[in-house]
Amino acid sequence: MRKNLAKVLASASFVVALILIVILLVTAFGGIKEEDFDNGLVHGLLIAISVLYVVIAGVTIALLFIQGEALHEIIVKNGKGESVRVSVGVVKKEIKKACHMIEGVKFKKIALIGDGFGVTLKLNIKVEDKDIDEVEIATRCYIEDCMYKTFGYHFTAIDINIMQLVPKYKANAEEINAEVAKKLEEKRAEEERILAEKRAEEEKQAAQKAEIKSNLNPEEESEETAAESETPTEETAPEQEAVPEQEKEETPAESAPEQEPEKA
């Protein structure tokens, strides 16, 4: 049904597209003048054809990308001049009968979907007190054995959708709490280790800075002492030079009175 509908819609979209192309070509070669399009009726028809083409093309693409369609029967044998078909109701009944032997599994819905590659079986189930892996393997094994031995048929794929789950798993509170405490202790120990490494790095940097500062201080002190030692020598030098000058000035003063009596 879906394939037939897709074919019809594809044909219709081709016809509409062909009409639009013809109008465009006739207009381009001068068969229809621009003044002819200046009409409300023509505008409405063009818009309607365009919208129709878009809708048909969209539906066709959607049908092409749909995974498949629900089947009413499947072909279990197909040969030259002969074929065997089985209705979906019969197939569902046999599948339910086989899968009821699986404990803890209840079937909510069974659907057969056909596509270009074959038939896919879709199951909606409810699981009680069972592990998912155990249910999945058991369901596939029972269905494949039933279909092959009853109809000689294999599904292309079996999709299992768990609608409700009452798991077999039960939490052990003591083990989980012990694991939580262990992980918390490991996390705190890791945080303390990181903090200790950070403090050690800071102390190392501080020691390096202090060592650099201590190496610089003696040089500064030596420069200061050198400056102090140079300052007094410069001050005393003028004093020492000033003393002989004073002596030279005093010497003629004292000798001058002694020479005056001799002239008299």
Image (cartoon, rainbow, N blue to C red):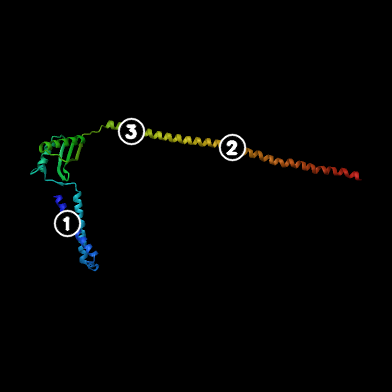
Residue 208 horizontal side relative to residue 55, left or right: right
Q: Amino acid at mark 3?
A: Lys
Tag 1 near tag 2, CB within 8 Å? no
Q: Position of residue 115 (x, y in %)?
A: 17, 45
The residue positioned 12% from the left and 37% from the top of the image is: 148
Residue ID at (20%, 55%) = 57
- SS of the residue under disc 1: helix
What type is the residue that disc 2 sits on?
Answer: Glu
229 or 12: nearer the viewer: 12
Farthest residue toward the bottom? 35
Q: Residue at x 83, y 43 (%)?
A: 252
Look at the numbered disc 3 and give the secondary structure of its residue: helix
| Marker count (numbered) | 3
Say which label, 3 or 2, has the lower sequence index.
3
Tag 2 secondary structure: helix
Answer with the quarter of the image where residue 235 lies: top right
Ranked by sequence position, the earlier of labels 1 and 2 is 1
Q: Position of residue 184 (x, y in %)?
A: 34, 34
Q: Which residue is mark 1?
A: 12
Callouts 1 and 3 close, C-beta under 8 Å:
no
Q: Quadrant of residue 156?
A: top left
Q: Which residue is mark 2?
A: 219
Front tag of 1 and 2:
1
Q: Which residue is mark 3?
A: 183
- Which quarter shows the C terminus? top right
Q: CA distance from mark 3 to mark 2?
A: 55 Å
Decide which of 57, 90 is in the foreground and name it: 57
Q: Residue at x 74, y 41 (%)?
A: 241
Q: Amino acid at mark 1?
A: Ala
> Which residue occupies the foreground of this view, 61 or 224?
61
The residues tagged by marks 1 and 3 sit, at their Cα atoms, a distance apart of 67 Å
* Nearer to us: label 3 or label 2: 2
